[in-house]
Image (tube, rainbow, N blue to C red):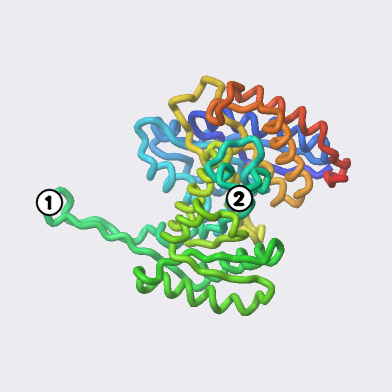
Amino acid sequence: MTTFRIAVLPGDGIGTEVMDAGQRVLEHAASRGGLAFEWTTFDWSCERYTTHGAMLPDDGLDQLAGFDSIFLGAVGYPGVPDHVSLWGLLIPIRRTFKQYVNLRPVRLLRGIDSPIRALAEDPDDLLDFVCVRENNEGEYSEVGGRLYRGTPDELAVQESVFTRRGVERVMRYAFGLADGRDGQLASATKSNGIIHTMPFWDEIFAELAGSYPRVTTAQYHIDALAALFVQDPRRFDVVVASNLFGDILTDLGAAVVGSIGIAPSANLNPEREHPSMFEPVHGSAPDIAGQGIANPIGQVWSGSMMLDHLGHPQLGEAVLEAVQIVLDAGLRTRDLGGTATTDEVTDAICDALDDVEIHPDGTRG
């Protein structure tokens, strides 16, 4: 039996609740697929920050380095600014472990209301594409600063950093992904207004396209691309974008398919030299924390993506099929218009997994 060592960071608010749900579903899947998980939980969170002055201990990243994957819940706590949690925990993990691909599926599941479904001639013609966001550089750099604070002359400078290596590696990942799917790759740009970094991005995209003759490419200015995400999202297969553009587009993609509460993500080190990290993209929702009504699907789906990355894609797809079975049965949490609790949805997904054919080695029949 293969055992995977997983670092668990439940975080804050509903993060602890959906993390428990995600682990339960993964344990159930593992029991059917010939796998085992060894979980190690860390209390690194915004709540920890309020008592220790830091999101994680000084040797925290060294502690994470030896795990096969990192499973994250949600971070955010009243009184702690969002930039503290991002720069104190998430970005150091993403950069230290070279998780330069942020992968976000945009898939419209049956049973979820969406403005896109209402526009479709066939409501079962389900939307299914993926966004590849550059995750280590771009607009989210630490280069810059502020001067003359509190005076009429105050100024702020924030630099974007695009390197050839950083742009090429995320684009190669996106091209490879498109090559294995429907063979279409769209790039987000704004080279008409951003005069240096975006033409650089466009030039590298054009250079790499010649190495992937099976992939049809397209480029869209980010404003037009955002409109097309709403008006005609079925035209897309794989979309690649810089850090900021990808961040915005992927949240829009989650809204298009009905709820950010179900949206998963993977922060990948494709070379597998370091652990990758898997997390839902919803926040810690302190307003509903402790009520047992949080939607666990985002965490469960992130766990499905973790199974994919660990080399068990059939088992990952089985987890997602179980989620679909539950939605088909009409069981939903309040954010999706239902009345079910977190535990009720989690139990139902585990039960549905028993109805999905899985061989003892984790393959599908």
Q: Residues within 10 Å of mark 2 (few under 14, many from 20)?
A: many
Q: Position of residue 193 (x, y in %)?
A: 34, 69
Type of the residue with mark 2: Pro
Residue sitting at the far left: 152
| Residue 279 visible here | no
User: Which residue was labeled with disc 1?
Assistant: 151
Label pair 2/1, CB-CB below 8 angstroms: no
| Residue 270 visible here | yes
Is residue 342 positioned above or below 67 on the image? above
Is residue 227 positioned above or below 48 on the image? below
Q: Which residue is depicted at the point 77% across and 27% down?
A: 351
Q: Which residue is depicted at the point 40% across and 71% down?
A: 191
Q: How many marks?
A: 2
Which quarter of the rendering shows the C terminus?
top right
Which quarter of the rendering shows the N terminus?
top right
Kindly identify which numbered label has been placed on residue 328: none
Q: Is residue 80 left or right of residue 182?
A: left
* Residue closer to the observer: 59 or 80: 80
Q: Is residue 171 left or right of residue 79?
A: right
Q: Which residue is depicted at the point 53% across and 73% down?
A: 205
Q: Is residue 293 left or right of residue 177?
A: left
Q: Position of residue 103 (x, y in %)?
A: 59, 53
Kindly identify which numbered label has been placed on residue 105: 2
Which of pointers 2 and 1 lies earlier in the amino acid sequence?
2
* Residue closer to the observer: 214 or 60: 214
Type of the residue with mark 1: Thr
Q: Position of residue 267 (x, y in %)?
A: 57, 52
